[in-house]
Amino acid sequence: HIGSQIVDRKVDSVCPFCGVGCLITYNVKDEKIVSVEGRDGPANHSRLCVKGRFGFDYAHHPQRLTVPLIRKAGVPKAYGDTPRPGDWHETFREATWDEALALAAGKLRSLRDTHGKKSLAGFGSAKGSNEEAYLFQKLVRTGFGSNNVDHCTRLCHASSVAALLEGVGSGAVSNQVNDVEHAEVILIIGSNPTANHPVAATWMKNAAKRGAKIVLADPRITDLGKHAWRTLQFKADTDVAMLNALIHAVIDEGLVDEEFIRNRASNYEALRDNVKGYSPEAMAPICGIPAGTLREVARAFATAKGAMILWGMGISQHVHGTDNARCLIALVTVTGQIGKPGSGLHPLRGQNNVQGASDAGLIPMMFPNYQRVDNASAHAWFEDFWHTKLDEKPGYTVVEIMHKALAPDSDPHKIRGMYIMGENPAMSDPDLNHARHALASLEHLVVQDIFMTETAWLADVVLPASAWPEKTGTVSNTDRMVQLGKRALDPPGQAKADLWIIQEIAHRMGLQWNYEGVESGVAAVYDEMRLAMHAAIKGITWERLQRESSVTYPCLAEDDPGQPTVFIENFPTATGRVKLVPADIIPADERPDAEYPFVLITGRQLEHWHTGSMTRRATVLDALEPMATASMCQADLGKLGLEAGDVVTIASRRGEVAIHLRRDDGTPQGAVFVPFAYYEAAANLMTNAALDPFGKIPEFKYCAVCIQRGGMP
Ligand code: SF4
C-alpha cells in the first residue's frame, strides 16, 4: 500500500542519481512508478534524499523519445543558440529501427574504412549500467578500432584518479562513507555533500553529533558548515598552499607517524624538503586561513585515533587537480591516517555509476580494471580475450576529442564521427560554444538517449533508449559496492534497451557478438566483464547479486563478504608502498583582472542533477527549483548595487548568460556560483577548457567573469 493506493508491483533497484548508491524500491501501478521507497541498503539504510524519493516521473515525461529519428536532409546543425526542449519535427523525421541503425552504423563504418580507425570516437555514460559501459568500450576498442572512448569521469574525478593510481595504486576509495562513524576528525574539502551526496552527508552529521570533529574546507561554505568544528574558507585556487601548510605543520610539530613512513611510504624526504617553504605563517596570507587555525587543524588530524578525508570536484576540477589530490594523499600518509577503519581517503564519486564505468574500461588509457592499454602484457591479454587486434596507444579524452573534431582535414587523427550514449557534452563540456561547434562539425553523430538533449539536437541519428527503471543491470557506487537494479517497466513506444542498441550497432560494424539470455543477454555480458576485471569482482557472481543486491569489492571469492577498508597491509603499487609526490603552487589558467574581476565557480545543487535532462523533467524537483539562479554574497551584491532577484548578465571571454541573482553568504566575496543544470543559462558557456596535464580534467571551478545588471533570462 502507498497511502490508500494498492500498487501492482514493487521492484528493487538503485537510485539513478548520485554516487552514494541508495537502494530503492519502485512502486508501480498501471505501468507507472507512483512512488519510491528507500531500502535497507548498506549505503543508505532506508534513507533517501529529495532526488531519490521524488525524482522518478521523468521516466513518464511526454518528451521521452519513443521512435528512432534521422535528421532531415538540408537542416543545418545550429549550435549558436542554446537548444531548447520541444518539438523536433522540423529537424528530424521518424525512421524504423532498421533504417536508423543501418544509417548510424553504416556511416561510422564508412568513415572508419575511409579515414582510418582514429577518425571515430565514443562517449559512454556513467548513468548507464556496468554492462553497458563494458560493452560500449568493447565496441569502440574492437569495432571502431581505437581507444578513443571516454565519459564524464574526465569532467569529474580524473585528476583524483591520476593521483591515486600514482600514489596508492588504486583509483577507488580506501574507506566507505559510513566509516566516518569510526573517525575522530573528518576533513571534507572541495565538496558540498548536503547538496551533492545528501545521504552520505547524513552519516557525517551523525558522526558530528557523537563528537567527531568535522573540518569543512572550501572557498564556498555550505550547509555542512553548521555541523563543522572548524570551517576553512580558503581563497579559491589556493588548495596546494593550504594543504602543504597542513603537512608542514605536521612535520614541524613532530607529529609525523615515523613508523608508517618507514614501513609503508616512499619519497618522504622529497615531500619534507618541498613543504619546508610552506609554513602556515607563510601560507596564511595566500590561502586566507590564520596560521594558528592551520596548525590547530593539522594537530587534530595527526593526533586523532582515526581521521578521514572526503573530497569532491572542488579539489579535482582545477588545472592543479592532480596536485591537490597528491597533497591529500601526502597528508594521510605523513600522519599514518590510512589503512585502518576510520582513517583514509574518499573521493566522493558524483554520478551513480562513474566508479563502475571507469572500472569497466570506459576511459581512453585503460582497459577494464585499470589495465593500461600501452602495457604489453595487458594489451596481449585483452587481444587474446577479445580475439582481435587492439590499438596500443591511449585514445583521446573528452576535451581532446572536441578539439580533434575541429582539426583541419589534413590531420590524420581528425575525429569525424561519434557515437554518444547517455552523455550530454553540449551542456557538460567546458567552453560550450567550442564544444557545440565541434559536435556540429562532425560528419556523423549518433546520439542514444531518453530525451532530445542539447547534444541530440546536433545529431544525424537519434536512437531512443531506456531510462534506468526500464532495465536490469549493475552499478558501482562511491563505496565500491556493486549493486543490482531490476527492470520495473517496459520502455515507452519503440524505445529499446541500451544493451540491445549497442549490440545492434556492433553487428552492423562487423562484430560477431552473441550474448544470449533475457534482457539482451545482460547476465552474459556481466559474466564476461567479471572475467575481464580479473580478481576485483571475482566473488561477485550474477547469481549472488540476485540474492544480496549489493556486494563490496575487492571480493575474491563467493564467500568473501568484500573488503570495506583496503590498504591494511600494503598498497597495490609496484613497491607495496605509498609514493609521495610533492606539489607546488600552480595558479589557475585564467585569473580575474580589471575587465573580468569575478571568479566563476560552477557546480550542482540539491534538486537538480548534472545537465538537468532528468531532474528538470521530474515534477517535484522542477517545482522546487524551476529556474537558474546565480549565488553571490550580500557584500558583493551591495557593492554592485544589486539585490537578490535582480537579473544580471555574467560574461567570460568565451560566453555569457543572463540569470537571476540569489543571495548566499557562503559564496566568498569576489566570486559567483552558477549551477550547470540549466540550458537557458548554461554555465559552461563561460567555463575554461584549460586542462590538468595529468588527469586531463577541465578547470570548471575557476575562471574570470564580469557581472552587469540586466539581460534577458
Ligand atoms: Fe539518490 Fe544520492 Fe539522494 Fe541517495 S543521496 S537518494 S543515491 S541522489
Image (cartoon, rainbow, N blue to C red):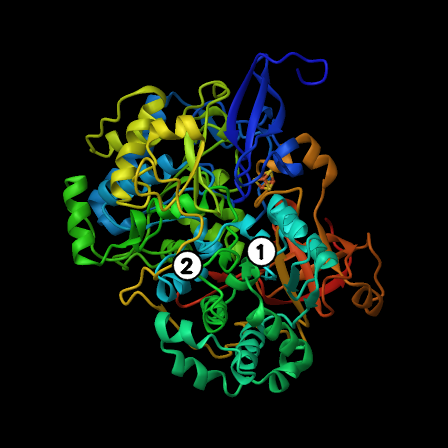
Give the structural element (helix, strand or loop) at label 1.
helix
Which residue is identified by label 1?
Answer: 685
Tell me if residue 581 can be seen. Answer: no
> Depth-wise, is mark 1 or mark 2 nearer the camera?
2
Give the structural element (helix, strand or loop) at label 2.
helix
Quadrant containing the N terminus is top right
532 on left or right of 710: left
Graded by Cα atoms within 10 Å as few (under 14), some (14 to 19) or many (20 or more), the crowding at tag 2 reads: many
546 on left or right of 241: left
**Is the residue 222 above or below the residue 705 in the image?**
above
Q: Nearer the viewer, residue 145 or 352?
A: 352
Tell me where residue 643 appears, x and y as whole percent: 84, 58
Residue in view at x 51 percent, y 47 percent: 426
Tell me where residue 621 appears, x and y as whole percent: 68, 36
Residue in view at x 48 percent, y 55 percent: 155
Hey, what amino acid is under mark 2? Val
373 on left or right of 13: left
Asked if the beta carbon under badge 2 is closer than 8 A to the nearest atom of ligand 1, the reply is: no
Asked if the beta carbon under badge 1 is closer than 8 A to the nearest atom of ligand 1, the reply is: no
Tell me where residue 639 appears, x and y as whole percent: 82, 70
- Residue 54, image quadrant: top right
Instruction: For marks 1 and 2, give the CA distance.
Output: 26 Å
- Mark closer to the chain start, 1 or 2: 2
Tell me where residue 676 appears, x and y as whole percent: 61, 50
Hey, what amino acid is under mark 1? Leu
**Is the residue 492 above or below the residue 389 in the image?**
above
Which residue is identified by label 2?
Answer: 161
* Quadrant of the picture in which ligand 1 is shown: top right
Tell me if residue 171 can be seen. Answer: yes
**Is the residue 576 above or below the residue 132 in the image?**
below
